[in-house]
Amino acid sequence: MSLMVRASGIRAYAAVMRGLGADPAPFLRRHHIAPKALDDDDALLDLRAVAQLLEASSADTGCGDLGLRIAENQDIGILGKLGVIIQSAATASEAFQIASRYMFVHSQGLAMAINPHSESIKGAVEIVFEIRPPQRQNIDLSLGLTHRFARALLGVHYDLKLVTLPHTPVASLSRYRRFFGAPVIANQERAALHMHATSLRAELRGANSELRQITEDYLSRHFRVPGDAISTRVRLALRRMLGTPQATMEGIAAMLAIHPRTLHRRLQAEGTGFEDIKESLRQELALQYLRETQVSLGQVSGLLGFPEQSAFTRSSRRWFGKTPSAIRKESRSGRF
């Protein structure tokens, strides 16, 4: 099934293209997007087509920072009712939790999570993004929009310390630094905004608990991700946090804004448990790292969240009947 995004997500695309001296209509038609669709914020567009549109438009116009330019010309209004809920949150932390929970309403290819301890900046939290398709301009647009939303909501309390990009930018890093007003590092493991921990404690001017409840109830009733079981959400959160101190029942429950006991009961109702999900994910990732990468066994152990490499070796024997080194050796010889 194709991932979809609301047309409002590229509301400024046509204007930016015209500013570059290009007619947006041929680009849109080439990627099977009706130009008139951009006039309806709630129209659903194929996300892969949108990502390819942005890449082609960037290449053909020679505009390496197209995603950032579109982000510069859009505001939180593109999120519709979700934007109303986010703005009515009491604190920045609550606003990001709401965005994490309901972002699928706007884009099915964008997910975010809060890592309370950035590994890159001491005293910072990390807003981690999972962006599909993971193409350069799509990533830049998503990061750029979130940065603008955060700056508008938090005002002087928004203290961005670092931006990490999971790609090699076409535009210069100085362009990114000017846009974000913070250091930017490319070719990192994941896309993330790293901000001072005090930023999330900021109280929002538009806090309105009654309005938030009304609009959140509306979204809960009318929108549901296919297969959005709590076990699926736990797995996605664990995938991002595995290997960090937050990959515990308590840490994941906090990310999902659910009490640990409630999370335990809901997982039981789906016939599974937190440790079952973690074990399954570790097995899948272990095979991926051992077969498809050159990451050292010690690093693989750390990525999977084992305290020592010997613990990883014992688990590998239990899962596969073989040691990690044996699996890697067999995969290289083509016998696995």
Image (cartoon, rainbow, N blue to C red):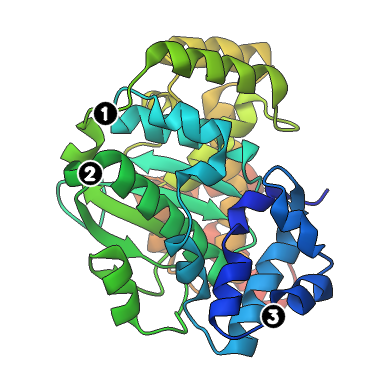
**Residue located beneath label 1 in the image:** 205
Type of amino acid under label 1:
Arg
- Dot 1, how many residues are within 10 Å of its Cα: few (below 14), some (14-19), or many (20+)? some
Type of amino acid under label 2:
Gly
Q: Toward the viewer: 241 or 137? A: 137
Q: Relative to 198, say whether 207 is above or below.
A: above
The image shows residue 230 at horizontal and vertical percentages of 61, 24
170 with respect to 200 (left or right): right
CB under 8 Å between discs 2 and 1: yes
**Residue located beneath label 2 in the image:** 155
Query: Which marked residue is nearer to the observer: mark 3 or mark 1?
Result: 3
Q: Relative to 258, say whether 30 is above or below.
A: below
The answer to which image quadrant residue 206 occupies is top left
The Cα atoms of the two marked residues, 3 and 2, are separated by 36 Å
Q: Quadrant of the C terminus?
A: bottom right
Which type of secondary structure does the marked residue at label 1 adopt? loop
Residue plotted at (19% across, 56% down): 121
